[in-house]
Amino acid sequence: ESYFLETNNPILHGEAIAAGIIAEAHISVLQGILSIEEYSEIKLFLKSKFPTLNLSKASISEIIELCRHDKKNDLAIRYIRLKAIGNAEYNIVIDENVIKESLLNYIKS
C-alpha cells in the first residue's frame, strides 16, 4: 500500500492486504507447508474480489525496503505462514530472496 502512495495510482487498503495474502500463501507453498490446492483456492477467491496490482520487477526492491520499515518488523522482515486455510503461524522471519520469488510469482499470475 505504501508503495502505491508514491504513485498516481494509490490503492485501497484491502487491495494491498489481498495481494499480501496471496504472496504469503505462495511463500507457504514454497516452504512445503500449504498445499497447492489451498493456495489456488485462496488466490482464486481473492482475485475474484480484488484487482491484481500493477507491479513490475523493478518495484520489488522498493517494496522489500518498505517492508523492512513496517511497524510490525524490527531488524527482520516477518510474515504470516499459512499452514492451512484458517490456520496460521505469526511473526515468522523471512528471507528477502523468498519475498522476491513470491512477488515475481504474483506479477506473473
Image (cartoon, grey):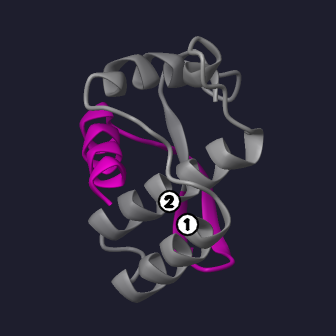
The reply to whether the magenta stretch includes residue 63 is no
Instruction: Specify which label sits upstream in the sequence, 2 or 1.
Output: 2
79, above or below 84, in the image: above
Which residue corresponds to mark 1? 47
Mark 2–mark 1 Cα distance, whole angstroms, equals 9 Å
From the image, state whether disc 2 or disc 1 is nearer to you: 1
Quadrant of the frame with the N terminus: top right
Which segment is the magenta one?
A: 81-109
The reply to whether the magenta stretch includes residue 99 is yes
Left of 50 or right of it: where is 98? left
Which residue corresponds to mark 2? 22
Tell me the amino acid under the disc marked 2.
Ile
Q: Measuring 55% from the left and 75% from the top, which residue is drawn there?
A: 42
85, above or below 109, in the image: below
Q: Residues within 10 Å of mark 2 (few under 14, many from 20)?
A: many
Q: Residue furthest front?
A: 8
Q: Measuring 44% from the left and 39% from the top, which residue is drawn there?
A: 54
Disc 1 is placed on an element classified as helix
Q: Measuring 27% from the left and 22% from the top, which residue is drawn there?
A: 58
Asked whether the beta carbons under mark 2 and mark 1 sit within 8 Å of each other, the answer is yes
Q: Measuring 56% from the left and 15% from the top, which residue is drawn there?
A: 7
Tell me the amino acid under the disc marked 1.
Lys
Disc 2 is placed on an element classified as helix
Left of 31 or right of it: where is 4? right
Left of 20 or right of it: where is 87? right
Residue 74, quarter of the rendered image:
top right
